[in-house]
Amino acid sequence: MRILIVNPNTTASMTDKIAAAARRIAAAGTEIIAVTSMHGPVSIEGYYDEALSVPGLLHAIRQHPEHDAVVIACFDDTGLDAARCLTDKPVVGIGEAGYRMAAMLSNRFSVVTTLARSVPALENNLHRYGMDRHCVRVRASEVPVLELEEANSGATDKIRQEIARAITEDRAEAIVLGCAGMTDLVDSMAQYFGLPVLDGVACAVAFCESMVRLGLRTTRLGGYAPPPAHKLDIAAA
């Protein structure tokens, strides 16, 4: 089984971190193919960055057709619907994967993400997925995405403090880390707080493996019908 993981931003070091997290939990026989978008923003923090990143994401999926499933490694689930139109293989966004897994492990969870400007997009997704009934709050740690790549930035402490507030103030029973760049923090945070802390990358890989083993594919009817052939090359322009 081959799972294609696309980082829709152009920061290769983040792709490396995401790939390592995916390979740690992938089952024997699952090959992880992690790629970085060739054009788009260096980080995705809100609506504007999302829009800029979609063409590069779609182009990356088309450039790597030998896959059984796709993971979109941005917590905003950037371009998720468009990607599902592009391929009938399962396509999973790490945000949706984290939310759904958390709802199966707890009665109420909070999300700890990066900047405040990212919060509305995540709240909209939660509402769309029907997960707003389970998510108590989306919290901003005010850590820019690229600071997660800097060892001495203080980002880890800020995220830890925000998780502590979520547990105390929100009465959260589980925490979803709201950025692919936080994937290397999941084990230490879960051990420190003693409750489920979820990384969307790992959750997405697990969902993809299950869907592929079940022989499931994305519908070609309705909104996920494939685009006309003459529109397929627009994303690469």
Image (tube, rainbow, N blue to C red):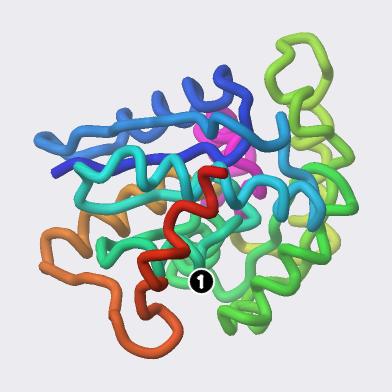
Query: Is residue 189 in view?
Result: no
Tell me: 8 left or right of 155.
Answer: left
| Residue 53 picture location, percent across and down | 65, 46
Q: Quadrant of the N terminus?
A: top left
Question: What's the amino acid at mark 1?
Answer: Ala
Is residue 155 found inside the magenta-colored segment of the image?
A: no
Q: Position of residue 181 (x, y in %)?
A: 62, 33
Q: Residue at x 74, y 56 (%)?
A: 167
Q: Quadrant of residue 79?
A: bottom right
| Any part of residue 183 in sight | yes
The number of discs equals 1
Which of these two is toward me, 200 or 223? 223
Residue shown at 84%/49% (left/top)? 140
Q: Say if 34 sits above or below 62 in the image.
A: above
Which one is nearer the viewer's eye here, 8 or 23?
8
Residue span colored magenta: 175-196
Looking at the image, which residue is at 63% across and 72% down? 108
Q: Is residue 199 left or right of residue 39?
A: left
Q: Splitting the image into 4 quarters, where does residue 76 fall? A: bottom right
Q: Is 149 on the left or on the right of 88, as rendered? A: right
- The front one of 104 and 207 is 207
Image quadrant in which you'd find residue 26 = top left
Residue 15 pos. (x, y %): 51, 27
Name the magenta segment's main secondary structure: helix
Residue corresponding to mark 1: 103
Query: In the picture, which quadrant includes the C terminus?
Result: top right
Q: Is residue 18 above or below residue 64?
A: above
Toward the viewer: 80 or 142?
Answer: 80
Mark 1, secondary structure of its residue: helix
Residue 188 lies in the magenta stretch: yes
**Looking at the image, which residue sits at the far top?**
152
